[in-house]
Image: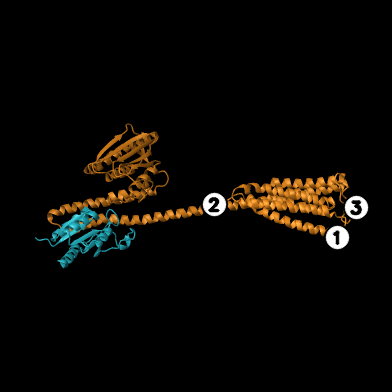
Chain colours: A cyan, B orange
Amino acid sequence: MASKGKVLIIDDDPDFCEFMRIGLESDGFEVLTAASGRLGLETMRREKPDLVFLDVVMAHPTEGVDVTATIKEDPELWDIPIIMLTSIMDTEYIGHFPTDKPLSVDQFLTKPVPMAEVLRIANEIVGTKS
Amino acid sequence: MIDLHPLKLELVERIGWLIRLRWVAVVSTLAGIAIARLVEPALPVLPLVTVTAVIALYNLLFLLYARYLWRRRGTGIRRRRSPIFAAVQIVFDLLALTALLHFSGGIENPFGVFLLFHVIIASILLSRLASFGVALLASSLYAGMALSEMSGWLPHVHLPQLADPLHYANPVYTAAHVTAVTLTLLLAAAMASSVAERLRRRTQELLQASQICEINRSELTEMNERLRQLDAARTQFIVMVAHELRAPMGAIISALNLVLGGYAPPEKQREVLERAQTRAYELLDLIRDLLELVRARRIEGPAQGVPVRAEKVLESVLGLLRVEAESKGLSIEVKVAPDLPPVLATEDQLRSVWTNLISNAIKYNRPGGRIAISLTHDGDQVVGSVEDTGIGIAREDMPRLFEEFFRGEQAKAMVQRGTGVGLAIVKRTVESYGGRVWAESELGKGSKFSFALPRATDELVAQTSENNQKTS
């Protein structure tokens, strides 16, 4: 079966990456994973994924936010849609981890996101893109 | 620092007052001489004006010296010399007043009561002893004058308008007069200096109280700031805890959702559920850690321990952690001294101490590194230590290492998850049994964490084994 598109998961939780992979692959997506912001950016430059699911709190509380800031300034990357995921309840709590970088994401979702929702979003975004 | 000697403080201020008062006295004396001369033509004006001029002259010198002292503010000289300076002034005034009295009728002059002013001034300004000294000097000068005039050793200036007949040559009158003056002066010194003393003490107490208030206020400000920081750290900790708790929970729900929703192919389902199970245990561990912390925090005063064999607990903890260490390629060396006495703690708590220290040594070690664990005894203490060849700790992080919720920069960069609670639990637990914890570390080379726990007394060991036999 031909791949519907490339989805990159940037998350330091290997279980979460694996679960996303299983779910997305079952719907025909090609899935890449990266365990840190740095690896995620490298993978994005190399693989040009159609969609990125990005975790906020990794090794550093604002690692995910830092990644979006880098993406925003890189013309090669700034068109790639970003869905931010976190276990932190809402953006208000981000205030406890101060960062001067603006959030630039297409959507902000709170974990756990039902797989049906993940697939709906992935199909919608990757679908409109292709 | 606040000068706590109000006597001396007051003196510095009062010396200016004394000098100003003396100018008033000079002018009043001159006016007095002029008026008296109108009534009493026998008044010898020249000697009286000369004495008054001498007073004016020495007052000028005192003024210059006071200005000099005033300029030496804060050097201590001013405070040291002021009492002597005041005493010298009072002595000069007594001599001058006695001279004025002598030239204006001796004991027949009722202005002899002016001696009282000097005694009162001395009582206010000087110490109790010094004011009695001044009273005695005043009485002696007065008595000396009276007796000298009576005996004819000094010429008596007779003022017929003031006193007639002659009193000065009457020994009974002179004795009565001198005694009355002496008693009055001594009593005045006693009363005035006692009041002044009490006032000074009160002033001193007030000064001390206000100084204590000042200290308390700065302590409170500092404490408030510490509390504010602690509160901020706690808020962040709660957010971290919430995140930590949600992460495994989120993973578990995702796993179940994957299987129940039919997204996981049959051959993957078991793996997904196994991962979920591991995360559920992780969640349980985290909750246990948090409870451990709460428990360790709640202990106040020395905790009631039982004899526990530290080496046995170490063995069972190693049994659980060895696999994790080996998966990272770490070698573990264990050195346990023979004949270790049991320590005072509980088995659970000692287990948590070992687990925290050893898992840190695993987590923050480099792959293929080494962990050296030792257990020895030193007098009445059993000393355990865990040394690793890991990332080490920055010097500036060392003092905060055992603080709750604190994680060093290197630790954060290396290991993602961590609540910063482990070492706080270790410290609280060990200290609650009267032990202590400490750490040595070199950045990039490794760290060594040690704890010392008091050994259980033989008595307690015997008692405990007796109880165990009874229950078994």
Q: Chain of mark 3?
A: B
Image quadrant for the C terminus of chain A? bottom left
Image coordinates of residue A108 in percent, x first then y, are 25, 63
Q: Judging from the image, what secondary structure is the residue with disc 3 in? A: loop
Q: Chain of mark 2?
A: B
Q: Quadrant of residue A21?
A: bottom left
Image quadrant for the N terminus of chain A? bottom left
Q: Judging from the image, what secondary structure is the residue with disc 1 in? A: helix
Foreground residue, B216 or A60? A60
Q: Judging from the image, what secondary structure is the residue with disc 2 in? A: helix
For the residues bearing labels 3 and 2, Cβ distance under 8 angstroms: no
What is the number of callouts on the image? 3
Foreground residue, A48 or B350? A48
Q: Chain of mark 1?
A: B
Whether residue B132 is visible, yes or no, is: yes
Q: In the image, what residue type sits under mark 1? A: Leu
Residue bearing the label numbered 1: B38
Q: Is residue B47 left or right of residue B1?
A: right
| Crowding near the residue tagged with mark 1, few <14, some 14–19, many ≥20 C-alpha atoms within 10 Å | few
Residue bearing the label numbered 3: B165
Numbered tag placed on residue B291 in the rendering: none
Q: Earlier in the sequence, mark 3 or mark 2?
A: 3
Front disc: 2 or 1? 1
Image coordinates of residue B87 in percent, x first then y, are 70, 48
Q: In the image, what residue type sits under mark 3? A: Pro
Numbered tag placed on residue B212 in the rendering: 2
Q: Earlier in the sequence, mark 3 or mark 1?
A: 1
Please report the residue visible at 30 percent of the width from the left and 34 percent of the height from the top: B336
| In this view, B395 is above or below A45 | above
